[in-house]
Each structure stands twice: as C-alpha cells, then as structure tokens.
Amino acid sequence: MSRVTHSVLAGGLAMCLAVAARAQLTNFTTIDYPGSTYTVVSGLNDAGEIVGSYIDRNQRRHGLLIRDGRFTVFDFPGVSFTLAADINAAGDIVGFYLDANNIEHGFLLSGGRFTTVDFPGAERTRAFGINAKGEMVGLYRKGEITYGFLLSGGFTSIQYPDSVLTVACGINDHGEIVGRWQDAAKKIRGFRLSRGNFTSFEFPGAQATMIDSGRINNNGDIVGPYTDARGKTRGFLLSGGRYTSFDVPGSTNTQGRKINAAGQITGIYYVSGRYYGFVTTLAPPSTSQPILVDDDGADCPGAVTTIQEAV
C-alpha cells in the first residue's frame, strides 16, 4: 500500500471552461426493473452492457446487469444490499455491499465469483470504477476523512491537496481517474488525475460539481452531475473542453453517471416521487467558437489549476 502526497505547481487561477449547450434529452430510454420502487443505472462498457441496482418492495437492494435488453439480478451472498457501480470490457463488475452490521465493503464480481475489496485498515470501502486492465478506484474512510483509492497490484491512497474529502469515481483504460473533492468550506468540485497531475474542474456557475459518481471514457470525455445556481441537479458532459448540460424532460433531478466510447451515457432521473435509470446519446458538441466563463459568469482568458503528484 502506498500513499500519494502532492505539491502545488500552479494555483490561485480561475478555472475557465467552455459552455457548449443545454439539452433536453429526447432520445433517452428509461430503465425500470419490473416491480421495483427505485431503479438506478451507473456503469456501462463499450459493448453497451449496463450495471446498476434496484430496490424491491421489501426494501432490499439488488445488483443489476442489463445485456441485450435483458435483466440479470445478482446479490453478494448473504446480504440484503448490493449496488453495482461499473463494468469493464471483460464483463467484470465492481460495486459495494452492506454486511450484517451495515458496514460497507467493495466487491469485484468476475467469472461468476465475488471477491471483497477492502482498503487495509479502513472503516468502510466502496468500489466505483474498473477499467479493462482490472484497475479499480473508489473511496475508503478512516476517522473523519474520506479518501480515494486506486487498486492496481496494490492499494494507493488518493487525496486532493487540502481537501477534507476525496472520492475516486472512475478510471479509463489509460489510467486517467476522475472524481470529486471537497474543501474546508464544503465546496464540491470535480478532479481529473492524469499522469500524476491533478486538474480541478467545475461546471461554470455551479454550486457543486460531481456531487455523485461520474466517469471518464477512453476519449477523455467526462460525465457527471452538478448542482446549478438555483439548486437543481443536472447532468453534464465535458468533451473537448466544452460543457453540455442535460436534463430528462419533466425531471427535477438528472444525473449523468458514465459514458462509453460510442458516446452512450447512463444516468438516473427523478420524477413523480421516484428514481429511474436511463441511457441516451448526446449529439457531439458544436464546433463553433466557445464562450469562456469563470465562476462569476464573466469572460476570462482560460486557465486551469494543476497540481503535481509526488509519490
């Protein structure tokens, strides 16, 4: 096990990114397990296989695999809470479960066999992402601090500098990691960790970015949820330096969860008192000249905050 420490290379700069568009999803497909009271979908691979979970009428949560339009239900043995978060090209699935004492443990489901994934010495562990190499990311908690982790041969702890919370949500086949971090003032932003460098990002004008799990594909496109200035949760796509905000029509809460190489996006939305999963494809961002905005909505020249990782 190793711990990652960090030194700041550049800081104090407003992060400027382009706002591409705001889109209402009209080509989305709702995913709702029959008889469920709550259905969410999180991960998908390039073959279009989707994973998620649902809650039955007895308030038990089960894992879901959706392949060619067919549901397969699975549970970590002996528990009543199983949540599947991601699936890789080989069909390996990661997520987390609650044991009899309501302690969270990560899991890997590979070749029909479950393996528990626990960060050494952690009070709780969740696995959120897996790539084609079998590298996993997630979170663990020790004391009052939540950290991210990478499992690649061994465990590596991930902490965004000066953060009080770091969560690693997704990893692509190039080893690029995305997640969220929270500062002492409780502001939540997204981060990208690539080749030892952290880049913080946030949807322009948002109260919070990457408030739940979001992920990155092999093209470097990122999806996730953000909270806008009015407090509404929306999905976003960050592609080629441009943001696209999206909503399911009529929903009060839309969250993007993962994007694959073909541009398929999974997520969840809330309407009429409950959550549903969805899958959609957004049109490519416009190639017109972007408008750069800072946190206050003013034009700015464009700058990012980059933090160097030292191991």
Image (spheres, helix red, strand yellow):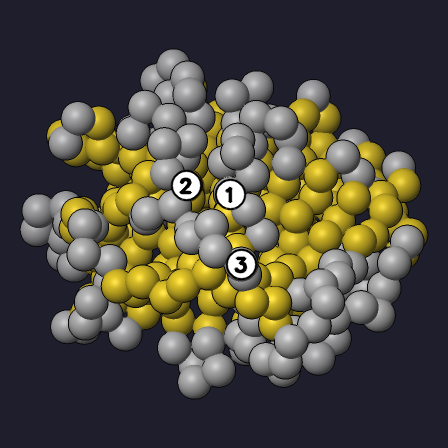
**Residue 221: which disc?**
1
**Residue 259: which disc?**
2
Number of callouts:
3
For the residues labelled 2 and 3, the Cα–Cα distance comes to: 24 Å
Mark 3 surroundings within 10 Å by alpha-carbon count, few (fewer than 14), some (14 through 19), many (20 or more) = few
- Going by the numbered disc 3, the residue's amino acid type is Gln
Q: Quadrant of the N terminus?
A: top right
For the point 48% across and 82% down, the residue is 229
- Going by the numbered disc 2, the residue's amino acid type is Ile
Residue 173 picture quarter? top right
Secondary element at image label 1: loop
- Going by the numbered disc 1, the residue's amino acid type is Asp
Mark 2 surroundings within 10 Å by alpha-carbon count, few (fewer than 14), some (14 through 19), many (20 or more) = many
Left or right: residue 93 compared with residue 247: right
Q: Can residue 100 be seen at all in this image of the molecule?
A: no
First along the sequence among labels 2 and 1: 1
